[in-house]
Amino acid sequence: MESSEPSLPFSTLLLATCESSAYVVGMVFIGYSGVRCGIFTPTIKKIIAKLVLNLFLPCLLFSQIGGTIDSSTIVKIWPLPVFCVLFAIISGFLGNFGGNLLNLSQSRKKFIMSSIIFNNITAVPVGFIKAFACTNAMQIFESEFGETLQDTKSRGITYLLLSTLFVLIIRPFVELFLPKDDPIDTSNHSLLPSQISKTEPRTLFTHFNHAIFTEETPLLLVLKRSSSPFRETLYLTKVKHILSNIISPPVFAGLSALIIGTNPMLKSTFFDSESPLYIYITANMKHIAVLTVPITLVSIGTQAGCAKTLFFKWNLHKPVIYVIICRYLIMSIVGIIVVLGCKFIAKDWDWFIINDPMFIFVAMCLACGPTAIDLFDSQDELLILTYNSYILLSPVIWFTLMGLLSITAYNVGKFAIAL
């Protein structure tokens, strides 16, 4: 889609990138500084994590998707889940290759595969789009239909939240294809049952998984390995676990928004400004939704602030370094090539939504950016990964955003090299 409007100078994109990055990275640093200064205690961090998952994110998904989605949009956004699945598959292969290359255990291979597959496609890119609305860079994303600045911003946020909803739905199924945890050596019988029960439970996916298994669980599995009823119970537990993850508060809110948004009668009931349900429910949810991005970014900062090791140590953190290289470099290149390749192939298809500049930017964001795996987990390696991704390498976020903006502007004919 070519534009007859004057091209944006490089200095405009540079300034817009600095302002947008300052908003996102600044919020992260607020959380990080709060932990270092003792403002955010472990209790407060846990409360914030639960609020983000069970209140803020559901309100954002419901109010944004339900108010902007319709049947025609549902039909046009089919490339979004395709890109999500494609990037997840490529990321999974990268993680598996890295695990074999570094000769890692199954648990650590599971860690790097998960960290590469699940990136932050909610707080960081949504924060960027919100910040873009205050800069001239928003001209890049304007469509030929003469929509307002608010409509353009809302369209981009909706694309990102629909992608988030899809990733939340498929995440439990993706986890089924990840390597299994290493079996725990139970040959040492020196531990008394009372000591075992006091052992800290550890789980890789604490943010979305509700089933927590302690070190006592493998002992039960060994004792009842030959029991058919026990295997059936185990299968039922897995099914229940998957269903509980799928029907989480954010997924329930997002699916409800899709149903309401595509039904004109329900949509007017919940999103008509004169409707009682809008006044007492939807309007309040919109007020809460405004806080989602800043609260989530601050939460990421609090997680990064808990890291004990603040610098790279290759011998100790090879998996972390590999994840960061894949997330910031390899997957960024893959995302740009795939999206621009699809745009080139579909350049003459007017009905294909990838010709929308906002969609191009969002689709590339699905492959780029830092990890989002269990941002509220307390395991050391995850804390170190979060710190290095969001604090130590925060300038890389600026460079990534600058690259995505420049590529999008160039592809819609709104980029000028001159300062």
Image (tube, rainbow, N blue to C red):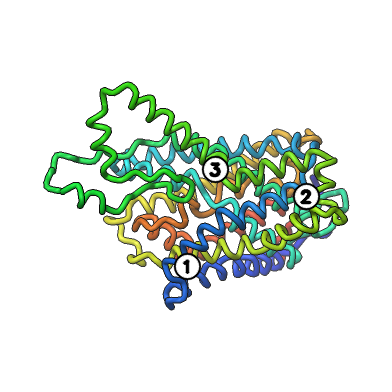
Mark 1 vs mark 2: give the one in front. Answer: 1
Which kind of residue does numbered mark 3 sit on?
Val
**Residue 266 location, quadrant:** top right
Q: Say which quadrant the C terminus sits in.
A: bottom right
Q: Which mark is residue 278?
A: none
| Residue pictured at 61% horizontal, 38% vertical | 83
| Residue pictured at 73% horizontal, 60% vertical | 284
**Residue 314 location, quadrant:** bottom left
Q: Which residue is mark 1?
A: 44
Between residue 57 and residue 110, name the one nearer to us: 57
Cα–Cα span, label 1 and label 3: 38 Å
Q: Which residue is mark 3?
A: 334
Among the two numbered marks 3 and 2 on one chain, the one whose residue lies closer to the N terminus: 2
Which kind of residue does numbered mark 1 sit on?
Ile
| Residue pictured at 39% horizontal, 59% vertical | 383
Q: Which residue is mark 2?
A: 67
Please tell me whether mark 3 sits on a helix, a strand or a loop.
Answer: helix
Mark 1 vs mark 3: give the one in front. Answer: 1
